[in-house]
């Protein structure tokens, strides 16, 4: 709360009554005179009163209250999407329109991966040019902070890369969710082994979405993937912690105070980066084995069917949470072979993946120089 705005993330603010998280709850907002209100559940201008089906939904609804912000909307797959931008100062002419258009491109592509989500409204809350930097997924919205102001010469405007990541979470994590992530136990940190899927696969799809949606060109996509591979093959910490154990360590690394600030890179490797590297490898492997008829999209949708379409396990949403075993079974079904040995070696272990062989199968090659790059093989077939 400051002169620029009021903003809250419910988990840090609202109390609950023990054994009553599943009960309906209401929220009444009394704003400063002349200030405006917006969140993922807002249906009328400056709506003040809200009703949520349970406590989890209340705290999963970040809210912005401010004297002024920019709101735009578009419709994709019959759903209304809103962008709220709280920009520090006046943005350059024309950038607002390009920004909204780029968000729409991301939504259109990512909806094609897993099908349009079960909602009628979704809201992007952006804070651009203010101190900090983060993004957080929510059921009907996302909140994103980027300290860089908009500059019209940039190919990827601040906020867009994070939006590509966070919107993929509308399915991966928020609906197709690890078993520990909904309903939550808010009294303690959560330890679970699958953040390399929840965040790592999301990282891969978010990076890929910038090109697949038409925002960046193929050369930039190759540079991005070359950097991802380089991290997965050279970071010292990759040999100290597996993707599975990196996920378990999340409470000590994701936003927590770093206990080893000068040694972290030697002892830890992020499940975001490791998971994205595993996703890239799986995507290429499945495409090669199927003659490019199947991809990682099919694994995700198989997992979605296994858990989202299952009988509801709790009051929280439909379906149930997934285990790492579910992910392994989904991958095995799509690949057509038992993936357990692969999971044990590369998810539970620290062996390096052979990207060169798979890239060759895609008509590409990895060039290891000062700046790693991916090149197309001149005589490759389409």
Image (spheres, rainbow, N blue to C red):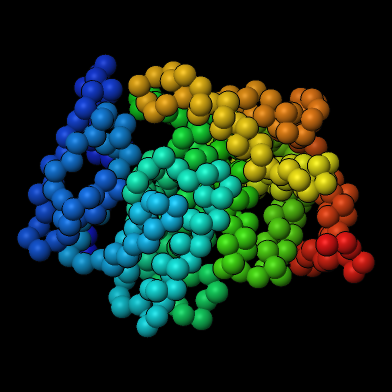
Percent x, y for residue 128? 37, 66
Q: Nearer the viewer, residue 381 or 268?
A: 381
User: What residue lies at 35% left-to-right and 21% top-to-bottom?
Assistant: 315
> Compared to 12, does 186 lie above or below?
above
User: What residue lies at 82% left-to-right and 66% top-to-bottom?
Assistant: 375
Q: Residue furthest front?
A: 78
Q: Residue furthest left?
A: 33
Q: Quadrant of the N terminus?
A: bottom left
User: What residue lies at 51% left-to-right and 26% top-to-bottom?
Assistant: 309
> Compared to 68, does 242 lie above or below?
above
Percent x, y for residue 9? 30, 44
Q: Nearer the viewer, residue 328 or 303?
A: 303
Q: Nearer the viewer, residue 1 or 258?
A: 1
Can residue 274 be spotted in the picture? no
Can residue 112 be spotted in the picture? yes
Residue 166 relative to residue 203: left or right: left
Q: Nearer the viewer, residue 355 or 370?
A: 355
Percent x, y for residue 144? 40, 56
Q: Quadrant of residue 70?
A: bottom left
> Compared to 3, does 136 lie above or below?
above
User: What residue lies at 23% left-to-right and 23% top-to-bottom?
Assistant: 23
Percent x, y for residue 345? 79, 31
For the image shown, how many numbered marks are present on the structure? 0
């Amino acid at each position: 709360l400051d002169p620029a705005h009021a903003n809250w993330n419910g988990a840090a603010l609202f109390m609950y009554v023990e054994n009553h998280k599943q009960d309906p709850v209401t929220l009444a907002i009394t704003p400063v005179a002349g200030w405006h209100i917006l969140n993922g559940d807002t249906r009328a201008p400056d709506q003040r009163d809200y009703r949520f089906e349970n406590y989890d939904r209340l705290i999963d609804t970040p809210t912005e209250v401010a004297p002024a912000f920019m709101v735009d909307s578009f419709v994709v797959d019959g759903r209304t999407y809103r962008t709220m931008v709280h920009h520090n100062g006046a943005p350059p002419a024309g950038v607002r329109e390009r920004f909204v258009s780029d968000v729409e491109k991301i939504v259109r592509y990512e909806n094609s991966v897993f099908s349009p989500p079960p909602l009628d409204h979704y809201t992007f809350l952006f804070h651009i040019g203010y101190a900090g930097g983060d993004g957080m997924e929510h059921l009907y919205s996302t909140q994103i902070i980027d300290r860089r102001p908009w500059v019209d010469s940039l190919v990827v405007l601040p906020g867009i890369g994070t939006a590509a990541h966070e919107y993929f979470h509308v399915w991966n994590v928020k609906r197709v969710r690890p078993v520990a992530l909904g309903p939550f136990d808010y009294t303690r940190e959560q330890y679970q082994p699958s953040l390399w899927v929840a965040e790592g696969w999301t990282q891969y799809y978010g990076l890929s979405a910038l090109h697949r949606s038409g925002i960046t060109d193929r050369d930039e996509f190759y540079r991005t993937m070359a950097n991802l591979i380089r991290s997965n093959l050279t970071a010292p910490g990759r040999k100290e912690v597996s993707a599975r154990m990196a996920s378990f360590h999340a409470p000590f690394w994701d936003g927590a105070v770093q206990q080893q600030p000068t040694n972290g890179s030697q002892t830890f490797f992020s499940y975001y980066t490791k998971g994205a590297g595993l996703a890239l490898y799986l995507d290429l492997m499945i495409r090669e084995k199927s003659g490019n008829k199947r991809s990682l999209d099919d694994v995700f949708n198989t997992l979605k069917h296994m858990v989202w379409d299952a009988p509801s396990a709790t009051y929280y949403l439909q379906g149930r949470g997934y285990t790492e075993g579910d992910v392994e079974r989904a991958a095995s079904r799509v690949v057509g072979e038992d993936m357990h040995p692969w999971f044990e070696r590369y998810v539970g272990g620290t062996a390096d993946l052979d990207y060169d062989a798979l890239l060759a199968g895609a008509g590409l090659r990895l060039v290891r120089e000062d700046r790693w790059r991916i090149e197309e093989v001149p005589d490759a077939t389409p």
